[in-house]
Every structure is written in C-alpha cells, then in structure tokens.
C-alpha cells in the first residue's frame, strides 16, 4: 500500500480568490492557470496496519501543528472514500518550491498527496475524480492534476462533485515562459486560506471582483487558443491587480506586496515600453511571476536580475500534470 507521485505547481492567470463552501473548498469563481515545469512536489504515501495515527514529513522534518492537521484531515477524506478508515499513513514529501511563500506549494503539495494517497490505498481514480478529491486539500491544487492551461470550473452542485479542473490545451500547445522573480522564501504571515476568507467577509471590493471574472475568462481563453500573447498577458495582469485590490479594502486591510514587488512591476512596464512583451502576475505572496516569449529570454532575465532585492530568477516552461514515480 505504497505510492509516489509528482505534481507541479501552477500559476493562476485568472485567480481563485474566495470560497462559497469552506469545508468542501468550493470557489466563488472559475479560475484558469498554467502548470509550471520549474516547481514541483514529490510525495510518497505508505499505509500501515500498525500505525495509530498519520505521520507527515516535509523536506525531512516531522511536521506537527496546523500543516499536519491539514494533511491528516485530507487523509481522512481519502480513507472515507476508499472505505478503509482502519489504516494510517506515513507521508514523506519534498517540495522543490519554497513552502507557503506565494509560489503555490499547496497546489503541488496537495495534488501529489492526493495522487499518491489514493493510489496507495487502492483506489483507481480517473483525472476528474482525482481533481475533485485534490480540491478538498487545497483549491488551487485541483488544477495541478493536468498539465498546460487548465480551467477550474466552480460547479453548481452543493456536494462539489462538479467542481473540478478541465484541461484546455496541453503543455506543448504554446511555448511561453514564466520567470519567478523571488525576493523572499519566507512563509507568508497570512496564508491564502485566511487572506481570501477575510476578503470575502469584509472587503467592499469583493462583489465587483466576482462580477469581473466571466468577461476575463472569455477573453483569455480566446487569447490562449489563438496564441495571442498580448491578450493573455494583459488580461492576466489586470486580473491580478484586481484580486490584490480586494485585500486593500478588507477589514483589517492587508497586502501581500513588498517594496521589491513594486520594483518588479515597474521593471515589467519598462520592458513593455521598450517593445518587449512581458506581463506580471502575483499570487498570495510578494514574489512576482513574469510572462514572456522565449525569444526575449535574455532581455527579461537581465532586467529582472538587475533589480535590487531580487535574489533569484527561476524560469519555467508549461509543465505536465500528475505523474507516478
Ligand atoms: P502557497 O503559496 O505556498 O500555496 P498556501 O498558504 O496556499 O501557500 O499554503 C501553504 C500550506 O500548504 C503550508 O502551510 C502547508 O500546510 C501546505 N503544504 C505545502 N506544501 C505541502 C506538501 N508538500 N504536502 C502537504 N501540505 C503542504
Ligand atoms: C492567490 O489554493 O492556496 O494563489 O484552497 O485555501 O488551500 P486553499 O487556497 P489556495 O489559494 C490560492 C490563491 C491564489 C490564486 C490561485 O492560485 O488561483
Ligand atoms: Co496555495
């Protein structure tokens, strides 16, 4: 009863920001992402008869507290679904991505966990079933089941059975690049889960965020199909700014941005004024992802590396979905 899975992170171009059901993780809006080949998690799950509780190692540290609770509650769902509430697991996970720094470790982390755990316990789920299960660990993770461009359909049913990711086009459809300009690998103070909940409950900007999504989705999907880089980039950038604006109108207000975040946004606008098509997007953290085309690799890298406060620039191509090791 042992399995190992690898999952990549994904960057949301249209963000998931807000839940309508906290326990099942049902989102307020559809979202759309690109799976990234540069960041991933590998997780091994082994169920044993002799264990009386789950054990969870992340990057070789034995984890307790909130992060442990999140894993063990997720494994409860897996056990329930498999009809095997009698077995506990030893979980070993390695993040090839900074944890809780806004680089989507929960996406690669929970999709690798869902894939490894469901296989180890003897279930044979198809990708759609796996995406429904994965969603219940971390919302953004349901998109990492697939490679390339992926949409998460929010679904209409109360039980969440129709809330899962759908692949739009595979990784080889379009050769674009995403550079993560990393200024900090520190864990954020306000986890995504807490940040979006506070926003939904208190931000006066939240309703207009939700209203803005359908139009963004229609335009960006057309852009992806036609490989219209400027369309895709400009919609993603505007969507990111609108999401982050909601946090400023929350009570108490907050932001994930730091001073270096602004410098990177400025640098990307500079690139555009000098004729290089580049666009930024930012998840729940200070680090910025920059979208650009392969022919501008050198110019973009050079620009980003010259910014004070940028410690590292990690380039991704479109990545693949879940795989078993
Ligand atoms: P991020 O921007 O990294 O996705 P989140 O706030 O969404 O940040 O989630 C971070 C949390 O995800 C961690 O505190 C931990 O609970 C969980 N997590 C991260 N990596 C893993 C992993 N490999 N396995 C299980 N849980 C993980
Ligand atoms: C800003 O999926 O990390 O990155 O569902 O509570 O685990 P939980 O939150 P999470 O939220 C991601 C928020 C985001 C946007 C996105 O990835 O779509
Ligand atoms: Co996350």
Image (cartoon, rainbow, N blue to C red):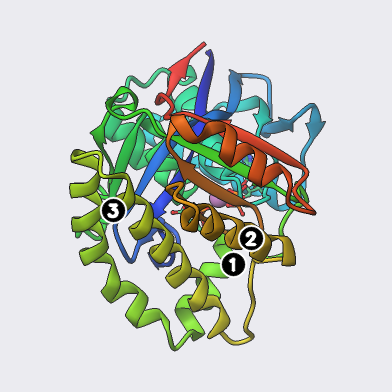
Front of the two marks 3 and 1: 3
Horizontal relation, residue 3 to residue 32: left or right: right
Residue 163: give x, y in percent of width and height.
27, 50
User: Are discs 2 and 1 less than 8 Å apart at CB?
Assistant: yes
Residue 176: give x, y in percent of width and height.
40, 33
Horizontal relation, residue 187 to residue 324: left or right: right
Q: CA distance from mark 3 to mark 1?
A: 31 Å
Please name the residue that numbered disc 2 is placed on. 191
Q: Residue at point 48% right, 81% down?
A: 201
Displayed quadrant of residue 81: top left
Front of the two marks 2 and 3: 3
Badge 1 element = helix
> Is ligand 1 within 8 Å of the beta carbon of the residue shown at mark 2?
yes
Residue 243: give x, y in percent of width and height.
46, 69
Please name the residue that numbered disc 3 is placed on. 231
Please name the residue that numbered disc 1 is placed on. 194
> Is ligand 2 within 8 Å of the beta carbon of the residue shown at mark 3?
no
Badge 3 element = helix
Q: CA distance from mark 2 to mark 1?
A: 5 Å
């Amino acid at each position: 009863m042992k399995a190992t899975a690898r999952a990549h992170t994904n960057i949301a171009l249209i963000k998931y920001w807000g839940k309508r059901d906290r326990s099942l993780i049902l989102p307020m809006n559809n979202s759309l992402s690109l799976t990234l080949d540069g960041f991933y998690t590998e997780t091994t799950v082994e169920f044993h008869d002799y264990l009386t509780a789950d054990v969870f190692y992340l990057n070789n540290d034995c984890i307790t507290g909130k992060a442990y609770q999140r894993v063990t509650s997720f494994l409860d769902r897996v056990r329930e679904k498999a009809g095997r509430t009698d077995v506990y697991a030893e979980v070993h996970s390695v993040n090839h991505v900074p944890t809780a720094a806004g680089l989507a470790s929960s996406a690669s982390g929970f999709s690798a966990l869902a894939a490894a755990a469901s296989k180890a316990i003897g279930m044979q789920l198809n990708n759609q079933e796996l995406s429904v299960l994965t969603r219940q660990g971390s919302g953004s993770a349901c998109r990492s089941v697939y490679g390339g461009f992926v949409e998460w359909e929010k679904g209409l049913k109360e039980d969440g059975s129709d809330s899962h990711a759908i692949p739009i086009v595979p990784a080889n459809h379009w050769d674009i690049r995403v550079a993560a300009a990393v200024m900090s690998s520190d864990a954020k103070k306000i986890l995504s889960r807490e940040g979006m909940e506070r926003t939904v409950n208190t931000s006066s900007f939240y309703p207009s965020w939700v209203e803005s999504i359908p139009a963004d989705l229609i335009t960006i999907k057309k852009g992806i199909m036609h490989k219209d880089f400027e369309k895709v980039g400009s919609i993603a950038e505007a969507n990111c700014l609108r999401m982050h604006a909601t946090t400023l109108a929350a009570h108490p207000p907050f932001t994930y941005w730091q001073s270096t975040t602004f410098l990177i946004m400025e640098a990307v606008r500079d690139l555009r004024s000098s004729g290089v098509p580049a666009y930024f997007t930012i998840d729940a953290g200070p680090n910025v992802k920059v979208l650009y085309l392969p022919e501008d690799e050198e110019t973009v890298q050079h620009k980003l590396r010259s910014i004070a406060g940028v410690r590292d620039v990690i380039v991704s191509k479109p990545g693949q979905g879940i795989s078993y090791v």
